[in-house]
Amino acid sequence: MTAAIFAAKSGSRVTVFEKNSKIGRKLCITGKGRCNLTNNCDAKTVIANTPTNGRFLYSALDRFSPADTMSFFEENGLPLKTERGNRVFPVSDRAYDVADTLLRVSRREGVSIVFEPVKDILVRDGRVSGLVTASQSLSFDKIIIACGGRSYPLTGSTGDGYTFAGRLGHTIMPLKPSLVPLETVEMIDNEADRLLIKNAALTVCDGKNGGKRIYTDFGELQFMRYGVSGAIVLSASSHIREMEEGRWHLSIDLKPALSAEKLDARMLREISARRTETLPQLMRSLLPAGMVKMFIRMSGVPSSRICSEITRAERRRIVALLKDLPLTVKGFRPIEEAIVTSGGVSVKEIDPKTMESKIVKGLYFAGEVIDVDAYTGGFNLQCAFSTGVLAGEN
């Protein structure tokens, strides 16, 4: 939609071909339905948060920066706000408002929208000549592929852009999930499945490099039957570039606001006040009920233990586990569950100053279909807006 708007602003007659019955479906589910549409930062920060081919974006971000994105939406009637981590959201907290703004501006600029899937792109003498839908063949002198990646296929992003680009001679870099939940070697108990911990700290260590810490964050974490999800886990996944089972180790601090010493002192007070109670009753004062069974199993302390019988060594084992619950990563969840697809059309075959193909004249690319992906925080949508503007204007 951004590419269409800026192509129309530049004087072109523009048609968007949309395979869904509504436009912007994937945008409407981003940020848990709130849409973290950019990050309130400078271009260098966006590039620093784009580990895959971030330097390719210099021209795009120079043309359309996060500040430009914010101005565009606010000037078109969508008030924005900046939250923790400089994440930018609509004041309404409704992703639909972001999509509606783009749709409204598209119509104002005279963009036509055809709700029909494209079957093929036509090329004559090394130049784009048109496209084929299920019902017709149409002539166009310029085409922008902006089909997204392969994540969340129910929203329409089923990898069509990779198919079109590949047929036309482009190299497609291997596709893999990014910003995706993690499966762990340790299975999570049924009672803890979908349990959300709002204030947890997560650290990821690389066992192949002496346990080197590669990522740490604080926020929401969710236990799932297969492993872990939640905001900080999705962010962590994008830092794991090469998946090898058993290589990556997670450490979850369930009580990040307390030092080990303060937590031990609290444990002593709780034990003293609950001398006749069992260990599960004690742990319910410290953890959500759904996590107690799994936690006690991992601690190795018998669940039948009465508080007055808990030894000093057992108490310290419990405290240590509250501060460092260890899990081993087994793998990524399927790409269909990922927020972002890593991989795509090779940037070596795209002119970074125009987004035009170096192989086919008149063919352009924008957004996630390109082999560029960033960390969570609004950076991926900013990449989409910036490459969309550049492709549209050219």
Image (cartoon, grey):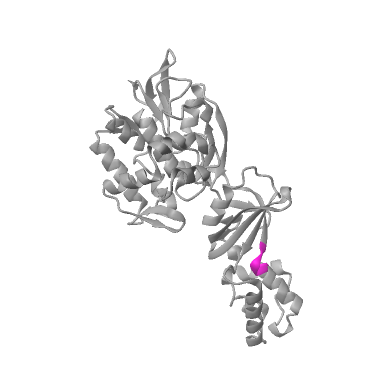
Q: Position of residue 57 (x, y in %)?
A: 47, 36
Q: Within the magenta stretch, is there residue 164?
A: no
Please state, as top left, top right, bottom left or bottom right, where the N terminus lies in the image. top left
Q: Nearer the viewer, residue 340 or 261?
A: 261
Please state, as top left, top right, bottom left or bottom right, where the C terminus lies in the image. top left
Direction from residue 97 to residue 209 in the image, left or right: right
Q: Is residue 124 visible?
A: yes
Which secondary structure is most common in the magenta stretch? helix
The residue at the point 48 percent across, 43 percent down is: 44
Q: Is residue 162 above or below residue 73?
A: above
Q: Within the magenta stretch, is there residue 323?
A: yes
Residue 253: image quadrant is bottom right
Residue 311: image quadrant is bottom right
Q: Position of residue 40 (x, y in %)?
A: 41, 50
Number of numbered discs overlaid on the protein picture: 0
Residue 282: image quadrant is bottom right
Q: Position of residue 161 (x, y in %)?
A: 46, 31
The residue at the point 74 percent across, 83 percent down is: 309
Q: Is residue 292 above or below residue 56?
A: below
Direction from residue 74 to residue 120 in the image, left or right: right
Q: Nearer the viewer, residue 28 or 64?
A: 64
Q: Is residue 286 above or below residue 362?
A: below
Q: Residue furthest top?
A: 125
Q: Nearer the viewer, residue 140 or 265?
A: 265
Q: Nearer the viewer, residue 332 or 356?
A: 356
Direction from residue 318 to residue 173 in the image, left or right: left
Q: Position of residue 260 (x, y in %)?
A: 65, 72
Q: Is residue 158 visible?
A: no
- Range shown magenta: 321-325
The residue at the point 71 percent across, 53 percent down is: 211
